[in-house]
Amino acid sequence: SGTGQHTFLTGLLKCGKCGYAVCVSSGYKGRRYLTCRGKSNLKVCDGLGRAIKTSEVELVVQTELIKKVQELRGVTTEDSPSKSKTEVNNLKIKLAQVKEQIDNLIEGLANGNAKLLPYLNAKIDELDEQKSEIESNILQKSLEHRKTTNTDAILDRIERWDELDFDEQRDTAKAMIEKVLVASDEIDIQWKF
């Protein structure tokens, strides 16, 4: 469910061997360890290979989150959003032009010669495909612009990681990480971006 209170990685941890969920179990003196559900519940896996402390994985992931922030900060430029906005505006202009061409052809159909109908219909179909493609590009560019904005907010949160409460850490990790594969000798973080 991803709402557990034992680690900010709840819902993201997966076994590096079988891919099933990894959960937190309490051990001696309240120490928290990771347990593969493929082994404990389904008996389809050998498990993680050794006892892995939750804090070990959290520390590695936190370190990698900070590295990822530095990497993304270097890539994201301040003019990315405005570039994306300009592209969207150019596409909107092109869309208006295509719509106008379609309207002119439809008007030509109403007033036109019967022999021209197949040609006009073919041209309208072609322009309609262009219109759909442009609308799709506009949507994609708009989403990219939003993603850049959201990324900046996430990066700001990671930079003040120690100030975040548990829920904010969990939400921030979920915003950046697709999943964390854990095995006895390896932690593989799969990023969303």
Image (cartoon, rainbow, N blue to C red):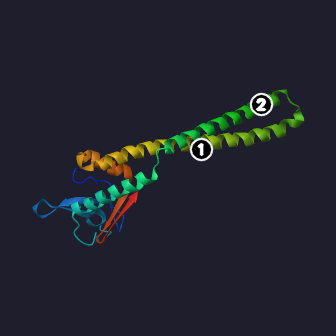
Please tell me whether mark 1 sits on a helix, a strand or a loop. Answer: helix
Could you say which disc has been placed on residue 36 in the image? none
Please tell me whether mark 2 sits on a helix, a strand or a loop. Answer: helix
Could you say which disc has been placed on residue 137 in the image? 1
Q: Nearer the viewer, residue 108 or 145?
A: 145
Position of residue 6 measured from the top left corner of the image (x, y, whole percent): 21, 53
Residue 67, visible in the rendered structure: yes
Amino acid bearing label 2: Asn
For residue 25, above or below residue 122: below
For residue 101, above or below residue 55: above
Query: Residue placed at 40% from the left, 45% from the top?
Result: 152
**Quarter residue 177 falls in:** bottom left
Query: Residue placed at 69% from the left, 42% from the top?
Result: 130
Position of residue 43 measured from the top left corner of the image (x, y, whole percent): 29, 68
Position of residue 135 measured from the top left corner of the image (x, y, whole percent): 61, 40
Picture quarter with the C terminus: bottom left
Amino acid bearing label 1: Asn
**Quarter residue 192 falls in:** bottom left
Q: Nearer the viewer, residue 149 or 56?
A: 149
Query: Residue placed at 23% from the left, 59% from the top?
Result: 24
Asked whether disc 2 touches disc 1, contact meaning CB atoms under 8 Å apart, the reply is no
Provide the residue designation for mark 2.
104
Marker count (numbered): 2
Residue 193, visible in the rendered structure: no
Q: CA distance from mark 2 to mark 1?
A: 24 Å
Q: Is 97 positioned to the left or the right of 38 in the image?
A: right
